[in-house]
Image (cartoon, rainbow, N blue to C red):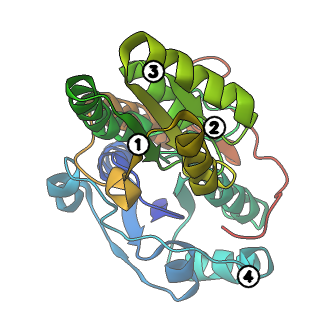
Amino acid sequence: MNTLGLLCSGGDAPGMNMALWAAARSAEARGWRVLGVHGGYQGLLGGSVEPWPADRLRPFARLGGAVLGTSRVPDFTRQVGAAAAQARSAGITHALVLGGDGSLRGAGLLNRAGLPTVGLPATIDNDVPGSAATVGFDSAVNFALPLADALLDTAEALPRLCALETLGGNTGHLAQAVGDACGADVVLVPEAPLAAPELAGRVSAALARRRHALIVASEGYPALEGVLDALAREVGLRLRLTRLGHAQRGGRPSARDRLLAGALAGEAADLLARGHAGVLAWRGAPTLLEFAAPAQQEA
């Protein structure tokens, strides 16, 4: 009997549980058995595998987090053979890995080690190459947006210089989306740091027009605190910085993320059933993306 192993790796993202349930449901409709791996690649290496049928996963589908748990394995490249062997020993014939860029590179390694594997992009950072959208991104944007709006409410009432720091790692997709959606005066992203005079000029212009300004910044922006402190001194206003922190990773998934998770999971199960592996589940054209060679060792 074909057996699908479900595994979440890296961090958690709203919608992961929906994807797990949808994948299990699709696999069972084909007569497959479903096993869940607890604790990501680390759990796979330790043999932490047990049955997780769709009915067991269903109550978690609407919740945030990752019911199977996740982990990071810095030296996974050297342990992938053992992980594939453990999967086969547990009876797993096919695998679905949910996660971000590093986790999906690990999935590519598993596939090359002989375990047919498909990856599903699930990360709030939206940084998986070749994927137009990742599960969790929309929820993270919607988590931040009301807080950005609230900062604007108070800034409009009493002239203030405010900044909102989002998650996003070393990428600015999340900060850019939040900033665009709320109408921020400046969005600071790691990929394109602003020179100090340009930043001060943009903020000063906003303050001159309406006596308040809002900056949205990614956590990965170089020396963010120092940049904001210098800016406050330059414009002569105290800056109020709000950090979202890891709360932005949690919460119930948005409708869009639930629908995306279900669609990607269904496609992943279909890909495996049709004999496709070493690919990324992707909605739209192109539908398949081959895993690139690993650029990093952590999975």
Whole-number angstrom distance, CA of label 2 to CA of label 4: 35 Å
Please say if 21 is above or below 208: below
- At 39% across and 38% down in the image, what residue appears? 162
Left or right? Give the position of 273 relative to 265. Answer: right
Q: Amino acid at mark 3?
A: Leu
Query: Counting residues from the N terminus, which is met first, the one under dot 1 or under dot 3?
Result: 1
Query: Counting residues from the N terminus, which is met first, the one under dot 4 or under dot 3?
Result: 4
Q: Which residue is mark 3?
A: 207
Q: Which residue is mark 2?
A: 189
Callout in the foreground (4, 3): 3
Q: Which residue is mark 1?
A: 136
Whole-number angstrom distance, CA of label 4 to CA of label 1: 28 Å
- At 54% across and 23% down in the image, what residue appears? 204
Q: Amino acid at mark 4?
A: Gln
Query: Counting residues from the N terminus, which is met first, the one under dot 4 or under dot 1?
Result: 4
Comparing 163 with 233, the one in front is: 233
Please say if 183 is above or below 145: above
Query: Counting residues from the N terminus, which is met first, the one under dot 2 or under dot 3?
Result: 2
Which type of secondary structure does the marked residue at label 4 adopt?
Answer: helix
From the top left corner, tell me how far across and down residue 25 is, in percent: 30, 46
Q: Amino acid at mark 2?
A: Val
Work out which quarter of the rendered image holds the C terminus and state it: bottom right
Whole-number angstrom distance, CA of label 1 to CA of label 2: 19 Å
Whole-number angstrom distance, CA of label 2 to CA of label 3: 21 Å
